[in-house]
Amino acid sequence: MKPTAVQGEWIAPASTTRKIAGEQATSKESFGKALTDALKDVNRLQVEADQAIRSLEVGKTGSLHEAMIALEKADISFRAMMQVRNKILDAYQEIMRMQV
């Protein structure tokens, strides 16, 4: 689930946008699915990085360059996920501070 740049504008992937005709998903389901998909992507990148390191250690196929790229992808995606988590927690805490 990666955004793509088109002429300098960021466009969300089609899987995260709500379809008006046909499919009527609630925002709760869409948001939850988007978070679940993002976590699965982060986990997949972490597993790929681990496999790249293991293959490098035992001398199988793969190079140091490919292993470092896999590690950096996993690191960047994990950091982005943590920032999203922090923003969600901040929003939750702000809502909890509101007086009813």
Image (tube, grey):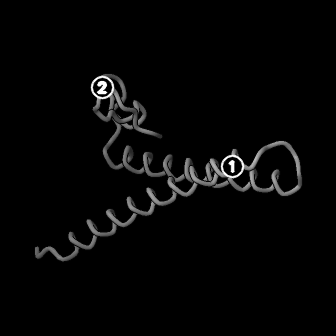
What is the number of the mark on residue 67?
Answer: none
Furthest residue to the left? 100
Q: Quickly name the residue at label 1.
A: 48
Q: Secondary structure at mark 1?
A: helix
Q: Nearer the viewer, mark 2 or mark 1?
A: 2
The x, y position of residue 27, in whole percent, is: 31, 45
Check disc 2 and give the amino acid type.
Gln
Q: Residues within 10 Å of mark 2 (few under 14, many from 20)?
A: few
Task: Specify whether 11 is left or right of 81.
Answer: left
> Where in the figure is residue 41, as x and y percent of width and height?
55, 47
Estimate how packed mark 1 is, as few (under 14), some (14 to 19) or many (20 or more) residues with alpha carbons within 10 Å.
some
Q: CA distance from mark 2 to mark 1?
A: 31 Å
Residue ID at (39%, 61%): 83
Furthest toward the top, the residue is 21
Q: Amino acid at mark 1?
A: Glu
Query: Quick one: 62 or 21, which is closer to the camera?
Result: 62
Quarter of the rendering containing residue 24: top left
Q: What secondary structure is marked by label 2?
A: loop
Labels 2 and 1: the sequence-earlier one: 2
- Which is more toward the observer, 26 or 82? 82
- From this view, report whether residue 48 is shown above or below residue 6: below
- The structure residue drawn at horizontal position 39% and vertical position 46%, both measured from the top left corner, is 29
Q: Position of residue 60 (x, y in %)?
A: 88, 46
* Nearer to me, 31 or 75: 75
Mark linked to residue 7: 2
Q: Position of residue 2 (x, y in %)?
A: 45, 39
